[in-house]
Image: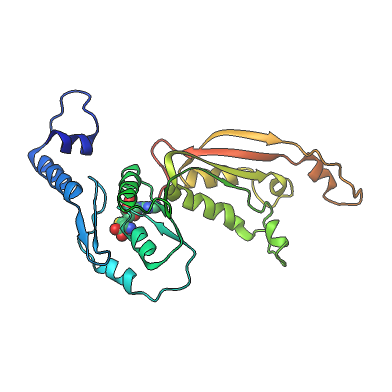
Amino acid sequence: MAEACRQAYGPAAGRLVIPVPDLLSTLGAHQWRVRGVPVRALGRTIHPHYGVFAPTRQEYIDLVAAAPWPRVRTAFDIGTGTGVLAVLLADRGAGRIVATGIEALAAACARDNVGRLGLSGRIRVEQADLIVCNPPWLPGVPASSLDAAVYDAGSRMPRGFLREVPHRLTSGGEAWLVLSDLAERLGLRTRGEPAGMFAAAGRTVAGRLDARPRHRTRRRADPLAENRAAEITSLWRLTRSPRGAGRA
Ligand SMILES: C[S@@+](CC[C@H](N)C(=O)[O-])C[C@H]1O[C@@H](n2cnc3c(N)ncnc32)[C@H](O)[C@@H]1O
């Protein structure tokens, strides 16, 4: 019972009162972890940890086992839980698998299962502590692939980045977003827009580093020369808002 509680609640910092139903489910979870759950499609056992989604109903695993197999060099298993699907993908022939999840408990559980099955060389269980993005800086419709590095209608890339970051980053992790204020200087974006996007994504600004242009504007006739010379490029360090405000 002590071991079951340690695994579920961590090392005891003092006395702990646990309702009996919770204690019973803690014991049940411990038994699963020790004995494992036999997974039909794998012909092996997966060991769920306390608080991690256990593969007890296995229809979904059978589906992943039965789907036509494309040529796969690298596969991603998003929201890996116990790692059961990552292991199945390895069995099916994926050369390299990256398994991710937002919960530290699940990442530890998946690593445990991957290690037990001797697949650590092929399956990497990851949680990102830092995600960096330097998106196109100007609102506008790109006409070529090079344009797409500079123009982005409706700031879709930074908005998508900010939307997805909460699902990919550890709770203490940082997202770094590089943006210039050229769009604001040209009146294509309002000054408050970046701050609004960060708040809507439940991100707090932990810091900002600014850089001024070092290049000389060569084309004197460039109508943007003045704005380019004054442009400030910023690296925004974004962390999770204290209450995760704005998370969908
Ligand atoms: C239904 S379980 C599936 C677990 C495992 N892949 C399996 O098939 O047994 C969903 C998993 O998604 C994870 N999850 C939930 N929200 C997530 C998010 N926003 N980003 C990544 N993973 C997430 C949960 O922690 C959980 O492990």
Residue at the image point whose x is 58% and y is 56% from the top: 157
Image side of residue 108 versus residue 230, left or right: left
The percent position of residue 35, horizontal first and vertical second, equals 16, 50
The single residue placed furthest to the front in the displayed view is 118
The single residue placed furthest to the bottom in the displayed view is 68
Image side of residue 9 versus residue 183, left or right: left
The image shows residue 89, relative to residue 27, as above or below, that is below
Image side of residue 2 versus residue 128, left or right: left
The percent position of residue 19, horizontal first and vertical second, equals 10, 37
The percent position of residue 237, horizontal first and vertical second, equals 56, 37
Indicate which quadrant contains ligand 1: bottom left
The single residue placed furthest to the left in the displayed view is 20
Residue at the image point whose x is 28% and y is 66% from the top: 61
User: In the rendered image, which quarter contains the N terminus?
Assistant: top left
Which quarter of the figure has residue 90?
A: bottom left
Residue at the image point whose x is 73% and y is 61% from the top: 146
The image shows residue 133, relative to residue 144, as above or below, that is above
Which quarter of the figure has residue 153?
A: bottom right
The single residue placed furthest to the right in the displayed view is 220
Residue at the image point whose x is 43% and y is 46% from the top: 127
Along the line of sight, the residue nearer the viewer: 137 or 74: 74
The image shows residue 208, relative to residue 169, as above or below, that is above
Image side of residue 192 versus residue 105, left or right: right
